[in-house]
């Protein structure tokens, strides 16, 4: 059994996109600013559609916006 | 706390207060001197039928007042869009609250099966509906704050 840890570089990408605000990114991707805040803070993992939209907004490939790490889950002791 | 969380909190407080005041009102004005009404189906039918529109109207009025207050006191957007995260949070919260109501419904039918008085069934039904709606709001608030 594997566990996936997903993180993102949205804060850094916003900085390099002329310090794009969370509201601007929200407007461009059609979600609320709170959703962008939640994604940045790792409190919400977006759908594939929204993830691609965010990547498209920054003109970056998806794996540059979202990164993941796979770790093996410990087997539960019986 | 953003506008959506404030709205949920407002709904929660309004629901609790409406329900509490309604119960107190019905008890003080109708039930106090005539407890036999508890076994009257007509009484329960009327109580449910009045509570539902009253609760809806109070919620609407309170939310209109809240929207006016927000418009006057801050520059926050009153009606931010509902996106995929909002829908997911709503679905998760509704799913759990439905389970609570289903348990309440089963218990209320159980009370009938065990030859309990009809008022026990109505009280369980009303309570489970109320608890389910409260849990729904609390869960939404929880998911907004803690993440999903």
Image: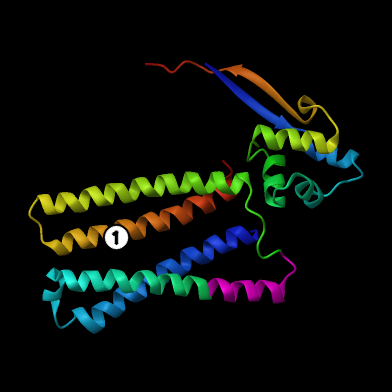
Q: Main secondary structure of the magenta part?
A: helix
In this orientation, which residue lies closer to the viewer: B125 or A53? A53
The residue where tag 1 is placed is B127
Residue A10 in the figure: left or right of residue B88: right
In this orientation, which residue lies closer to the viewer: B121 or A43? B121
Residue B38: image location, x then y, percent: 15, 71
Q: Residues in magenta?
A: B62-76
| Chain on which label 1 sits | B
Q: Count neighbours of disc 1 (C-alpha within 10 A) and say few if under 14, some if 14 to 19, many if 20 or more.
A: some
Residue farthest to the right, as pictured:
A18
Residue B20 in the figure: left or right of residue A7: left
**Residue visible at 70% across and 38% down in the picture:** A50
* Element assignment for label 1: helix
Is A75 a magenta residue?
no
**Residue visible at 36% across and 76% down in the picture:** B21
Residue B36: image location, x then y, percent: 11, 75
Residue A34: image location, x then y, percent: 68, 51
Q: Quadrant of the C terminus of chain A?
A: top left
Residue B64 in the figure: left or right of residue B126: right
Q: Quadrant of residue A4?
A: top right
Residue A19: image location, x then y, percent: 89, 46
Residue B11 in the figure: left or right of residue B49: right
Q: Quadrant of residue B131?
A: bottom left
């Amino acid at each position: 059994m594997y566990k996936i840890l997903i993180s993102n570089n949205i804060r850094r990408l916003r900085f390099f996109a002329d310090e794009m605000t969370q509201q601007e990114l929200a407007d461009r991707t059609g979600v609320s600013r709170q959703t962008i805040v939640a994604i940045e803070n790792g409190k919400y993992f977006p759908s594939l559609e929204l993830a691609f939209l965010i990547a498209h907004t920054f003109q970056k490939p998806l794996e540059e916006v979202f990164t993941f790490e796979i770790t093996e889950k410990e087997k539960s002791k019986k | 706390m953003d506008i959506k969380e404030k709205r949920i909190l407002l709904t929660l407080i309004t629901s609790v207060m409406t329900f509490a005041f309604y119960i107190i009102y019905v008890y003080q004005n109708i039930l106090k001197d005539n407890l036999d009404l508890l076994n009257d189906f007509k009484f329960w039918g009327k109580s449910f039928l009045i509570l539902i529109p009253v609760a809806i109207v109070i919620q609407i009025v309170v939310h209109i007042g809240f929207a006016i207050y927000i418009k006057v006191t801050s520059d926050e957007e009153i009606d931010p869009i509902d996106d995929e995260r909002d829908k997911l949070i709503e679905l998760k919260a509704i799913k759990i609250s439905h389970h609570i109501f289903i348990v309440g419904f089963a218990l209320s039918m159980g009370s009938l099966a065990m030859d309990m008085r009809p008022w026990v069934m109505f009280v369980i039904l009303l309570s489970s509906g109320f608890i389910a709606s409260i849990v729904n709001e609390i869960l939404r608030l929880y998911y907004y704050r803690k993440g999903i």
